[in-house]
Amino acid sequence: MLKEIIISILVIVLIFTLDFFLQNYTKDSVEVMTGKLEILRENLLKKDEEAILNNMQDINNNWEDIQYKLSFFIEHNEIEKVKTNLVALEGDIQVKQYDVSISELNKSIFVLEHISDKYAFNLVNIF
């Protein structure tokens, strides 16, 4: 009987520990991407074409790495929403529709923050 209790406690501790690390990685990844998108927004408002293209390339490179890791423990449709918005953002930037691209940028930020909130370990998400 004692053996089962100890194993159960170890499993519960392991689950909480892994959740803590995964939640921190998700939060950090969202903060990095949101920060890069905020920098892109500033460049879009200034209409600095070279900086916009550099920022978009950096965002795409970072997202590929983050997307790969997040796909292990986040629903794929959530990740696909971000990718869809980033592709639309990149398309608007390529045709130099900077005003429209800010809308796609805001959608990307919203979905990223939604992912962070959805997978946070808090009372609202438990019940």
Image (spheres, grey):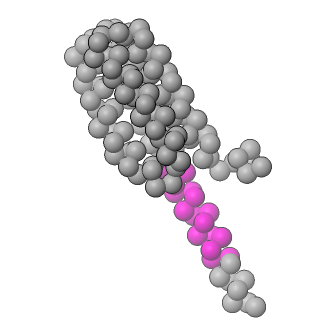
| Lateral position of residue 4 relative to residue 70, left or right | right
Taking the magenta stretch, the answer to whether it contains residue 33 is no
Report how many numbered discs are placed on residues in the image: 0
Can see residue 24? no
Q: Is residue 99 above or below residue 32?
A: above
Taking the magenta stretch, the answer to whether it contains residue 15 is yes
Q: Quadrant of residue 57?
A: top left
| Residue at image location 69% in from the left, 90% down from the top | 3
Q: Is residue 95 above or below residue 120?
A: above
| Residue at image location 47% in from the left, 28% down from the top | 108
Q: Magenta segment, principal secondary structure?
A: helix
Asked whether 44 or 86 is in front, the reply is 86
Asked whether 79 or 34 is in front, the reply is 79
Q: Is residue 2 above or below residue 51?
A: below
Relative image position of residue 5 (x, y in whole percent): 72, 83
Relative image position of residue 40 (x, y in whole percent): 36, 21
Q: Which residues are magenta?
A: 9-26
| Lateral position of residue 13 relative to residue 64, left or right | right
| Residue at image location 63% in from the left, 70% down from the top | 13
| Residue at image location 49% in from the left, 21% down from the top | 106
Relative image position of residue 17 (x, y in whole percent): 57, 64
Can see residue 1? yes
Looking at the rendering, in which quadrant would you find the N terminus? bottom right
